[in-house]
């Protein structure tokens, strides 16, 4: 019989602390119920094959030679596999068959990737499949190393932490610290996709190459205040704090020429304020997704429904389920 491991991990949305988390501030992040899946099985021969149906028609092939990963083809397409294999020290051993599935992170109509953390979710799922574990102590460091390698050193690790644990969390880079939080009673939300993909790595590179302005320090302070509001769990206070936080994020964006509120985010922010709701881009901004929030669920739903002609309201919600694995056996030896 052949052992088959199926691992999955959720995507994520950063609710506050984007960029500031790199300067030691807390980030608030929630896992969402779109999942990346990895199927890993032993295979005959010496060559491991990698497929990702729906993402590419190509098949990656590699083998272990003297403890090193040697790609026969597909290295550029399947960089994530090489990063995880190195981070997990998974080079020795027999051949595998690997299937990667991130279809739940794609908009089927526009054929574009929705920016809710597909690479982090896939990294966590692949690490769990390779390590045969879902324990944070076993996976966190490996997944962080792999994703940092994949992103060429960029990023805070908040997306990895959230995909690993699930739920709503506060994350700090120092020690990869994770504190679980509860979703506040009476706080309604909808996730909005702008339809424009954004590059987190590109924006981080631009930030690091520029001159730091005072608004960067103020964003750290605003992120601390947002984290305190989330810990307090009062929906009205959270909405109130977001008004200042969004202003600080906007000024930070202008000062550092990051375009965080581009691609429709500024329009949505202004319209939400006029409707006595709050809206903000999530993560790097400049496209991808944002979140609409309010304490009046009917008003939130009405606002979201009116966006259908120009933006996409995502049918995904907070999930408490982090990374999972399941082992089965198939075939005969």
Image (cartoon, rainbow, N blue to C red):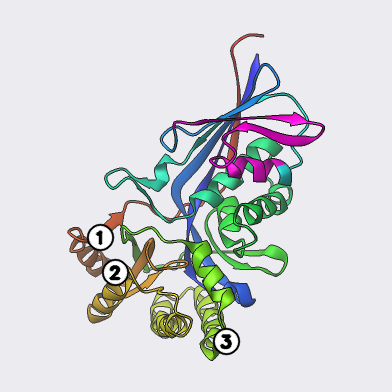
**Residue 125 lies in quadrant:** top right
First in sequence: mark 2 or mark 3? 3
Q: Position of residue 201 (x, y in %)?
A: 53, 62
At numbered mark 1, what does the secondary structure look like: helix, strand or loop?
loop
For the view shown, which residue lies furthest in the right direction? 66
- Does the CB distance between marks 1 and 2 fall below 8 Å? yes
Q: Position of residue 177 (x, y in %)?
A: 67, 65
From the viewer's side, name the closer residue of 24 and 206: 206
Read off the residue under disc 1.
Answer: 311
Read off the residue under disc 2.
Answer: 264
At horizontal 31% and vertical 75% (from top left) the residue drawn is 266
Please tell me whether residue 51 is drawn above or below residue 255 in the rendered image: above
Q: CA distance from mark 1 to mark 2?
A: 9 Å
For the view shown, which residue lies furthest in the front direction? 72
Read off the residue under disc 3.
Answer: 217
Q: Position of residue 61 (x, y in %)?
A: 61, 29
Residues in magenta? 57-85
From the viewer's side, name the closer residue of 195 and 14: 195
Q: CA distance from mark 2 to mark 3?
A: 26 Å
Left or right: where 5 falls relative to 284: right
At horizontal 62% and vertical 61% (from top left) the residue drawn is 157
Q: Position of residue 173 (x, y in %)?
A: 66, 68
At horizontal 71% and vertical 38% (from top left) the residue drawn is 131
Quadrant of the rendering where the C terminus is positioned: top right
Nearer to us: label 1 or label 2: 2
């Amino acid at each position: 019989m052949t052992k088959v491991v199926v691992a999955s991990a959720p995507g994520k949305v950063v609710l506050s602390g984007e960029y500031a988390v790199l300067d030691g501030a807390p980030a608030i992040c929630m896992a969402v119920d779109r999942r990346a899946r990895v199927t890993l099985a032993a295979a005959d021969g010496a060559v491991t094959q990698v497929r990702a149906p729906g993402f590419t028609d190509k098949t990656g092939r590699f083998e272990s030679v003297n403890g090193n990963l040697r790609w026969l083809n597909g290295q550029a397409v399947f960089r994530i596999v090489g990063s995880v294999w190195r981070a997990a020290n998974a080079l020795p051993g027999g051949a595998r068959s690997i299937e990667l599935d991130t279809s739940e992170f794609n908009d089927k109509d526009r054929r574009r990737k929705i920016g809710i953390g597909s690479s982090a979710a896939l990294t966590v799922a692949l690490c769990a499949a390779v390590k045969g574990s879902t324990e944070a102590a076993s996976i966190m460091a490996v997944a962080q190393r792999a994703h940092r390698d994949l992103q060429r050193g960029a990023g805070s690790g908040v997306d990895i932490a959230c995909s690993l644990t699930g739920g709503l969390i506060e994350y700090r880079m120092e020690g990869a610290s994770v504190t679980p939080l509860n979703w506040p009673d009476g706080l309604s939300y909808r996730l909005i996709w702008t339809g424009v993909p954004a590059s987190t790595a590109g924006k981080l590179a631009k930030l690091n190459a520029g001159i730091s302005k005072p608004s960067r320090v103020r964003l750290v302070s605003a992120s601390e205040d947002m984290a305190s509001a989330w810990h307090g769990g009062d929906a009205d206070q959270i909405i109130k704090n977001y008004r200042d936080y969004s202003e600080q994020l906007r000024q930070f964006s202008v000062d550092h020429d990051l375009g965080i509120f581009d691609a429709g985010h500024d329009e949505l922010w202004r319209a939400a304020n006029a409707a006595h709701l709050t809206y903000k881009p999530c993560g790097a901004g400049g496209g991808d997704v944002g979140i609409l929030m309010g304490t009046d669920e009917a008003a939130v739903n009405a606002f979201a429904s009116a966006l259908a002609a120009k933006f996409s309201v995502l049918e995904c919600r907070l999930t408490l389920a982090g990374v999972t694995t399941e082992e089965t056996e198939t075939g005969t030896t």
